[in-house]
Image (tube, grey):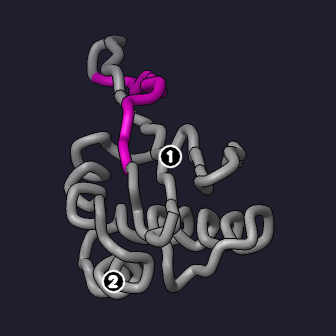
Amino acid sequence: MIKRLRSSTEAKVLAQHIRMSVFKARRVIDQIRGRSYEETLMILELMPYRASYPILKLVYSAAANASHNLGLNEADSFISKAEVNGGTVVKKLRPRARGRSYTIKRPTCHITIVLKDKSK
């Protein structure tokens, strides 16, 4: 589920319940924080991690929000804030020997990306 939050000078995108570990997503987010929009796209397309695809979709969505809702130019924007927070843990039970069960924990995360214009 993706929530789009609106502000007057920044385009903000929040993706919740992404099925991925917080640490794996933070490894990618730390590389793009503070970079320009075009440089971010190049980095995310070339990174070999699975976490880069949902983050790339979020950056595209934030840029679309900035251009459509606020009238900002995508080429002049940069990532001012990017953070990953932990979400709920999906717990499942797996049957094991002698009638016992084993829990499987599937972590989720919430990713927030904020785009700002360089000129403002």
Type of amino acid under label 1: Ile
Closer to the camera in the image, 68 or 46? 68
Rendered view: 87 above or below 119: above
Residue in view at x 51 percent, y 63 percent: 120
Q: How crowded is mark 2: few (under 14 residues within 10 Å), some or many (20 or more)?
A: few
Rendered view: 72 above or below 22: below
Magenta residue span: 82-96
Task: Provide residue 53's location: percent of width, then percent of height.
Answer: 44, 70
Closer to the camera in the image, 105 or 8? 8
Residue in view at x 49 percent, y 63 percent: 54
- Residue 66 lies in quadrant: bottom right
**Residue assigned mark 1:** 18
Does 12 appear in magenta? no
Q: Is residue 82 visible?
A: yes
**Residue assigned mark 2:** 39
Task: Provide residue 34's location: percent of width, then percent of height.
Answer: 29, 62
- In what element is the residue under mark 1? strand
Type of amino acid under label 2: Glu
Nearer the camera: disc 2 or disc 1: 2
Hey, which residue is sitting farthest right in the picture? 69
